[in-house]
Image (spheres, rainbow, N blue to C red):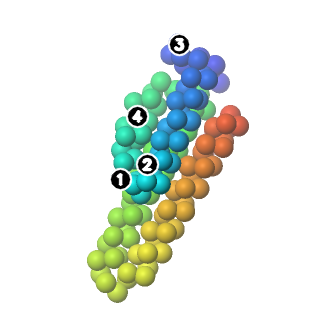
Amino acid sequence: MNTVVNDIPLEGSKQAARLLYIGHAVTFLFSLGLLNLIPLIINYIKRPETQGTFVYSHHGWMLRSFWIYIALVMAGGIMFVTILLIPVAWLVWVGAWIWYAYRLFRGFMDLNSNKPMP
């Protein structure tokens, strides 16, 4: 793995990814994902700078996590509209919330351990 990415030290890229994990977590906790667009856009901007390092996989992890979370929330919304599936919709939403929180926590911990994400 490279220790320098486009003349930016790897530690700087790691720090940016750490801040993005924190940004995703804070916006997720206070807006249930509505404000996650801010760290999401920054992920898309910063991701190419980390090409060839394990930090690149963390950007992909955060991006995939966000979009899968949004798909699950939308699926729950469709279930909620059907009225009969309202209890199932709540289970989907709670499950999506727990899953997304787990993904952010695991990614943050693996980044601090210098491990790439799958």
Q: Mark 3 highlights which residue? A: 7
Rounded to the nearest whole Å, what is the CA distance between mark 3 and mark 1? Answer: 34 Å
Secondary structure found at label 2:
helix
How packed is label 1: few (under 14 Cα within 10 Å), some, or many (20 or more)?
A: few
Q: Is residue 64 left or right of residue 107?
A: left
Q: Circle 4 is placed at which residue position?
A: 42
Amino acid at circle 4: Ile
From where the camera sits, is residue 15 visible? yes
Could you tell me how far apart the alpha carbons at marks 3 and 2 are, in whole angstroms? 30 Å
Residue 112, how many percent across, how many down? 67, 36
Number of labels in the image equals 4
Residue identifier under label 1: 34
Indicate which disc, 3 or 1, sits on the residue closer to the N terminus.
3
Write the residue at 49% across / 38% down. 20
The residue labelled by disc 2 is 27
Camera-side mark, 3 or 1: 1
List the single residue furthest toward the right: 113
Dot 3 falls on a residue whose secondary structure is: loop
Residue visible at 34% across and 87% down in the picture: 84
- First in sequence, mark 4 or 2: give its number: 2
Amino acid tagged 3: Asp
